Image (cartoon, rainbow, N blue to C red):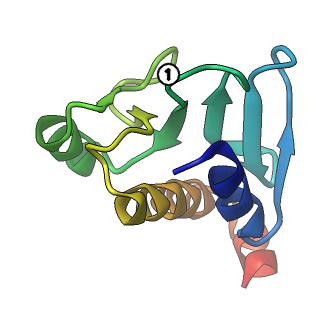
C-alpha cells in the first residue's frame, strides 16, 4: 500500500475530507468532523496510520499481524496503528480503512448518518 493509494481510498468514502490539524506532516481524514484515519509523516518510512477498530477485532488483529499495534496517542482499546508493510496484505489494509470509516459513521448522530445514505 502506498501513501497515494491510502489517500485515494480514504477520500473516496462518502463526505470524507482531509486536513493537517497538528502539523504539516500529520494528515487527518474525517467524516462529519470526526477522524477515521490519522496518517503520520508524509516522508516517514515505513508508512503508519491510526485506524479505528472494533475493540474485539483490534485485539485479534494485533495478535495476527506484527505490524498492527495499539493506537499511538489514541485510545488503545478502539484504535490501532497499522504499519504499511508486507505482513498486512493490501486488501486487508483497504478493509481496515473502510472498517474505521464505518465505525466512526456508526457513532455519528442519526441525522448525520442519514445524510450519508
Q: Nearer the viewer, residue 57 or 94?
A: 94
In percent of width and height, residue 111 lies at 78, 71
Q: Residue at x 66, y 63 (%)?
A: 9
Q: Quadrant of residue 91?
A: bottom left
- Residue 96: percent from left, percent from top: 43, 56
Q: Is residue 111 left or right of residue 36?
A: right
Left or right side of 79 for 100: right
Res 21 quadrant in image: top right
Report the number of numbered marks.
1
Q: Is residue 52 above or below residue 9?
A: above
Q: Quadrant of residue 115?
A: bottom right
Q: Nearer the viewer, residue 115 or 70?
A: 70
**What residue is rendered at 39% in x and 47% in y?**
53
Q: Which percent across, then down, holds residue 108?
A: 66, 58
Quadrant of the drawing holding the C terminus: bottom right
SS under mark 1: loop
How packed mark 1 is, by other alpha carbons closer than 10 Å (few <14, some 14-19, many 20 or more), is some
Whether 81 is drawn above or below 13: the answer is above
Residue at the spot x=75%, y=48% of the render? 30
**Is 85 or 94 nearer to us in this picture?**
85
Q: Which residue is mark 1?
A: 74
Q: Position of residue 49 (x, y in %)?
A: 54, 34
Q: Is residue 84 above or below residue 1?
A: above
Amino acid at each position: 500500500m502506498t501513501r497515494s493509494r491510502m489517500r485515494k481510498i480514504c477520500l473516496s468514502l462518502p463526505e470524507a475530507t482531509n486536513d493537517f490539524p497538528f502539523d504539516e506532516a500529520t494528515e487527518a481524514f474525517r467524516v462529519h468532523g470526526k477522524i477515521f484515519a490519522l496518517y503520520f509523516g508524509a516522508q516517514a518510512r515505513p508508512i503508519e496510520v491510526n485506524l479505528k477498530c472494533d475493540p474485539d477485532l483490534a485485539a485479534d488483529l494485533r495478535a495476527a499481524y506484527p505490524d498492527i499495534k495499539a493506537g499511538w496517542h489514541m485510545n488503545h482499546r478502539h484504535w490501532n496503528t497499522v504499519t504499511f508493510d508486507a505482513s498486512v496484505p493490501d486488501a486487508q489494509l483497504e478493509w481496515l480503512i473502510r472498517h474505521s470509516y464505518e465505525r466512526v459513521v456508526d457513532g455519528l448522530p442519526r441525522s448525520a448518518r442519514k445524510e450519508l445514505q
